[in-house]
Each structure stands twice: as C-alpha cells, then as structure tokens.
Amino acid sequence: MERRLLNPEATRAMLEERKARFEQMAAQTQAMAEQMNQLTVTVTDPNELVSVAVDSTGNLTGIQLSARIQRTNPDVVSRTIMETIAEAKRRIIEQTQAVIADTVGADSETGKAVAASLKARFDSDTEDDAR
C-alpha cells in the first residue's frame, strides 16, 4: 500500500475554496430567508366580495369583506373566502419558488429542501382546510 503525502499548500488552497463556497452558500441562504420573510400576497376574488392576505408561510394575515356580502348567499361567501385563500397560497408558493431560484438556486440541495418543506407545509394546510 502506497502512502500519499499531502501537499500542505494544495490542502490549504482546497480548504480556502471550500470555506469560500460555504460562506457564499450561507450568504445566499440568509438572503433567501430575508426575502421570504418579507413576502406577502393579497388576492381579491373576481366578484370583489373578499380580499385576503397571506404571508410566506401561507398564514392568513388579513381578510376584508365587502358590504355586498350582506346580500350574498352565505354558502357563496364561504366558498369565495376559501377559494380566495387557496389562490393566495398558490401565488405565495410561486413567489417563494422565485426567491429560492434567485438566491440559492432551485436545483441546489438547500433550494430543494426549502421547496420540499414549503410544499409539505402547504399540502398540510390544504388538508386542514378541506376538513
């Protein structure tokens, strides 16, 4: 068995390169997190009965009902609210995917992990909403 001697300068250069890649990845991940924390989407249904706002985690952060809901069948109002929330969540997913692609890259391990986590979160929310 032949033993290889490590070249100290080559090893140092390799470690410096890895450190630089790690620091770049950390900066990109931080930028992604900051941008995602600022995301919010507001959607109004086509009939302008309801407007809803959701944040980057899909949490409902605001809802406005127009005065016209008083003259609208409650089942229609309820369905409209749920559909509008679903549309807002769909749009926030699109925005978060764009942030992931622009910062860490959609094909990076970090990008894939964050996207999978968000998908699981939103899929869970959809199941909860259906109950």
Image (cartoon, rainbow, N blue to C red):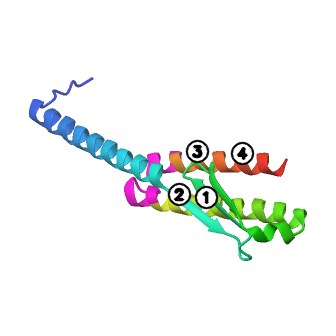
Of marks 3 and 1, the one in the foreground: 1
| Residue where numbered disc 3 is placed | 117
Q: Is residue 4 left or right of residue 84?
A: left
Classify residue 82 by image quadrant. Answer: bottom right
Q: Position of residue 130 (x, y in %)?
A: 82, 51
CA neighbours of label 1 inside 10 A, class few (<14), some (14 to 19), many (20+): many
Q: Position of residue 69 (x, y in %)?
A: 80, 67
Of marks 4 and 2, the one in the foreground: 2
CA neighbours of label 4 inside 10 A, class few (<14), some (14 to 19), many (20+): few
Q: Residue at 74% of width from left, 51% of height from top?
A: 126
| Residue where numbered disc 1 is placed | 53
CA neighbours of label 3 inside 10 A, class few (<14), some (14 to 19), many (20+): few
| Residue where numbered disc 2 is placed | 40
The reply to whether dot 1 and dot 2 touch (C-beta < 8 Å) is yes
Dot 1: what SS? strand
Q: CA distance from mark 1 to mark 4?
A: 19 Å
For badge 1, the amino acid type reads Ala
Secondary structure mostly seen in the magenta stretch:
helix
Picture layout, residue 32 above or below residue 18: below
Q: Is residue 106 magenta?
A: yes
For badge 4, the amino acid type reads Ser
The reply to whether dot 4 and dot 3 touch (C-beta < 8 Å) is no
